[in-house]
Structures are given as C-alpha cells and as structure tokens.
Amino acid sequence: MSRKDDDVLNGQPISEDAILLAQSGDARVREDVIAESVPWIKKLVRKHSFMISVDNTDEFSIALDAFNTAIDRFSTEKQIPFRTYAAIIIRNRLIDWNRQRTSVRREQSFSDMDRGPIPYEERLEDTRSGIAYADIESEDSMIEVEYKLSLFGLTLDGLVEHFPKQRQTLIFCVKAARILSDDSELFEKTMENRRLPVSEIARRMDETAKRIDKHRSCILLLAILLQSDLFLIRSYVAILEKEANL
Amino acid sequence: MNRGVVLSVDNASMVVFTSGCRLERVPSRAGVAPGQEIIIESTKTSQKSRGTVFRPLMAFAAAIFAIVAGVIISQSILSSRTYAVISVDVNPSIQFSLNEDLIVTDIQALNADAAKLMVKEQYKGLAWQDAVDRWLICLEENGYEDISDVLISAVMPAKDEALKTQLTLLEEGAEDSKYRMHVIYSNDGGVSETARKNGLSVGMQMLLNQSAAQQGPWTAENIKAVPLGEIIRILAQSGEMDQTRITVSHPAGSHTSADPTQPSTPADTRPTADPTKPTKPTAPSNSHQSTEPTETSTEPTETFPTETSAEPTETSAEPTETSAEPTDTSAEPTTSPSTSFSIPSNPHGGK
C-alpha cells in the first residue's frame, strides 16, 4: 500500500496533523477524515467479509468503529502510515467479530445470545480462554512488526513454513538477529535499505554469507521482534540465549 | 504445556511465537488478539485429548466391523467349503466340488480333452445334476456322440443322505436314457486325496482301490488307458450292467453278499466313515468271516477277475483282509478299498 494511495483526503493527502487534531478533540476534522474514508473502509469490509453490499451490515459498523479507534491510537512515533495502521486494526476487529460469531453459534445457548459480545475484561478473566497474559498495547507493537516485515515483502503466514525447526539453526538465527538488533545503526540502515546486511553479519559472526542468506527471513523477524516492545517475546529469546550460553 | 505470544490471527488459525522461540500455526480461538500470551496445547496433549474421545469410538467401530467381517467371511467360507466331490467319468472326465447345498463351487478337468471343453463359469453355481447334464450335452455337441457308459462317483460325508438319495434317483432316472449310468460313492474323504495324488478322478480311484483289493492288474498309470466300460464291467459290475450297485450297506446274508466282487463293509456301520479321517483297513463289521485275515491273503489271485464270480461266497466274505496287505499291483491304494469304495445301495428299493 503506497503512501500516495493511503493518505488522501478530499483530494489532499491525510496529514498526520489532521489525525492529531482529531485525537485532540476536533470533531469536525474527525468526521471529515471518517467521511472521506468511508469508500476505502467499505472496500476493506468487502475484502474481508466477501460481501458485495456492506451498507447497514454489522461488519461495516465494526469497521467504522475500528477506524475511529485507529484515529485515537495512531502514533507518529511508529512511523507507520495511518491507513496501513488503520487497515490492520480494522482487519483484526473484523476477524475477531467473525470468530466471536462462529464461537457463539458453536458454544453458547440461546439465552446467552441475549448478552451480546463478551467484554474484553471478562474474556481475560475466563480461564477457559487459555490467555496467559494480555497487553492491549502489544497490538500496536504487533502492527509495527507486521508493517516492518511487509517492507521486506515478508508475511507472518509465509514465515511459519520457513522458520527453523532444529534448535541449532534456531540458535544460529538468534545469534545473528541479536547482532542486528543490538546495533541500532545497522538496524536502521537495514530498515531504510530494506535489505539485510548479510555480509556484515557474516563477518561479525565469522560465518559464511550463504548461511546467513539462507535464514534471511528468520533473522529479520527475530531482529524486528527484539527491537519491538514485545517484552514477552524478548524474554523468550533471552531464555533461549541463556540456555545456549550465547 | 507450552506458552506463546500471538503474532497474527486469522479466521481459522493463529501464528504464535512460542516460548521455545519457534513460529507455529495453531487453531484459532475466540477472544484472542495479537500480542496476547496464550497457553498452547502441545501436539501430544492435543492428540491425547482427541484420543480420549475418538479411541473408544474407534474401538467400538472396529469391533463392530470385525464382527460383521467375521460373520461375512465365515459364511463365505462355510458356503464355499467343499462338502462333496463328484466326478463324471466319460473320458473326457471332469470333477465337481460341491458345497453343503450340493451346488457346484469348483470344477476340475481331469484330462486334456476335458480341459479343452470345460468353461468353469458355465458350471459354477449350478446344482450338480444340472452340471452333469450340461457336461454331457457339451460332450455331445463337441463330437462325443457315441458315449455309452458314464461313471458318476461321489465322495461325501458318511452322514449325508441327500446326495446319496439324489445319486440313486439319478441312476434310476437314467434307465430310459441312452447312457448307462454307473453310480458309485464313498464316505472316505481319503479317496479324493489319493485320487488327486494319482491324477485320477475319485471314481477311477475307487475302481483302482477295488482293483488292488482284488489283486487286479491295474495301477494308477495304466488304468487311465483302459476303456471305461470295461473297467466298470469287470470291477464294479462283475460284467453285468444291472449289478452296478453293489450294495455294501446291506447286512450280510442279503442279496449283495452273493456278488463276488463286493469288497467292502457297509458304510453306515464302519467306525471310520468320517471323511475327514483316512481310514485304515478294517474288518467288515458285519462279516463274521473276517477273523482270519491270513487265509484270504494267501489266495488273492483266485478272486480276480472272473473267477470271483464263480466263487462268490469265498471272496465276498473277506474283502478287507486282502486290502490289509496291498500287493504291488496297485500304484497307490492308500485308502483301503473296503472303506473307501462302496457302491450305493438303493435305499428306496429302486431295483
């Protein structure tokens, strides 16, 4: 999604200032931003719900609500284009809605259906949900990870298939990712160039560039995760490093 | 129990970064958002929990399947198990295997001519009488028009009555036909085994056994070359067609005892009539003359072939004792003629 397509409002690009104004309480700017984004929001809803006409549907309402949330939560610090950010928020909400609806159909009795969606706090307290820890802020961190990966043409779905299964390979990738993430300058350069500095990492690890390149996507994901605010994931990696005496 | 942080969520699955630093796809759950730490069921646990539900069901289904399959297979085996064997010796000769319903389950050509004419599929599933008819018609249609003697031989369990009766009726019914039907049978299952070893039909094996009992000149090799009618006249009928049925089941002193060639014991009184047990030569149960085997064994040649008819009482009295010491004239008379060979009586008093 290019910036040119994303940030256009009334023929003019959506400035971060407009979003910041809306966040600060300017209702008119907020309404303008939402009104001008309706066709784009409908397009997103059609894409996720496989419906032709989305007017007056629950999905469209949820998408509008998610867009409004995106305006509130958007931060310029992340350097993520607003529409990319909003698109991920809308997608997550639509998926969540869809899963809830399926779950209600499958598990709840008719009397339960009157209750409507279960509040988020209630869901977290429910031991059956299997949720060990929840951090609302971490959704933003995940959006950032997803965006950064997209800069390299990578997706999480695609990475699952190519992620190392063997422990030794995994340790090797962690070691390389740690070199990249610990060097902020090198990491920034990588993000800017959208290319992994294979030879530099190979040199620092005293490994062949071929081996680094083979696990390029895994090293990138781990480096991005280590650079993120996802402290749980960082703790997982730290435990592995400790176990491997890295 | 494993933990992991949800990286992305789809309608059906989630991508999770596990505590072991692996990226895994797990089934989606309601109420889970990206960034949350969740507890992941390990694959083994998942399989176990699935197994607790499915295993009893699978076991039950497998048990039902096994029972049904067992019943079907046992029915199939029982229905296809060979209950009796009938050979039709015309030269070309053929042999039918029958199930308990006396339906043809298998056919065996006993010589090359028969093999040329026989199409198994045309006989399988027929009642044995129909199969015999079809075979005779087939022979006629293929140039065997001058057939006169037909030897129908059967090996069946001792307890059988149905086949015995049908054989008798067949012979009676054939009186007006152009064929001379000769029917013989045995309750000794060993006959068919010996016949198979010798490459003979069960009928020819019975005749061979009788030949051995009478110290006859025929062996498994040369009996094939002898015209069927001649063998029957000499061995089974003592030269008279009307005496085809040498009734061994009649008590001693009946008209059958007058037949000099009658070698055997009444089938229904033999202790070894069970076809599953090849029998040993035994003295006839109704024969009070059988107590001195050495007397007959010293004069075996006097009884064969034509002289026997001249001295009926001497030879018929002790047939089994001669077979107790089979002479080298028989190739493989492994079963005693007295037990393996019997010419059916006519229980209905046909003649």
Image: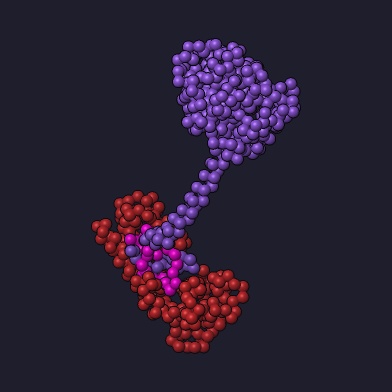
Is A49 contained in the magenta span? no
Which scheme is used to colour this image of the protein?
by chain
Residue A141 in which image quadrant: bottom left
Could you tell me which residue is drawn at 41 percent across and 59 percent down?
Answer: B51
Q: Position of residue A59 (x, y in %)?
A: 54, 77
Q: Position of residue B53 (x, y in %)?
A: 42, 62
Q: The chain drawn red is chain what?
A: A
Could you tell me which residue is drawn at 46 percent across and 53 percent down?
Answer: B63
Q: Is residue A73 above or below residue B325?
A: below
Instruction: State whether residue A22 appears in this view.
Output: yes
In the displayed structure image, the side of residue A8 where residue A123 appears, left or right: left
Residue B111 in which image quadrant: top right
Could you tell me which residue is drawn at 58 percent across and 70 percent down?
Answer: A50
Q: The chain drawn purple is chain what?
A: B
Q: Position of residue B284 (x, y in %)?
A: 50, 25
Q: Nearer the viewer, residue A161 or A132?
A: A132
Could you tell me which residue is drawn at 54 percent across and 47 percent down?
Answer: B72
Residue B30 in which image quadrant: bottom left
Instruction: State whether residue B138 appears in this view.
Output: no
Q: Which residues are magenta?
A: B16-44
Q: Position of residue B164 (x, y in %)?
A: 60, 33
Q: Nearer the viewer, residue B45 or A60?
A: B45
Is B25 contained in the magenta span? yes
Q: Is residue A48 above or below residue B160?
A: below
Q: Is residue B130 above or below residue A175?
A: above
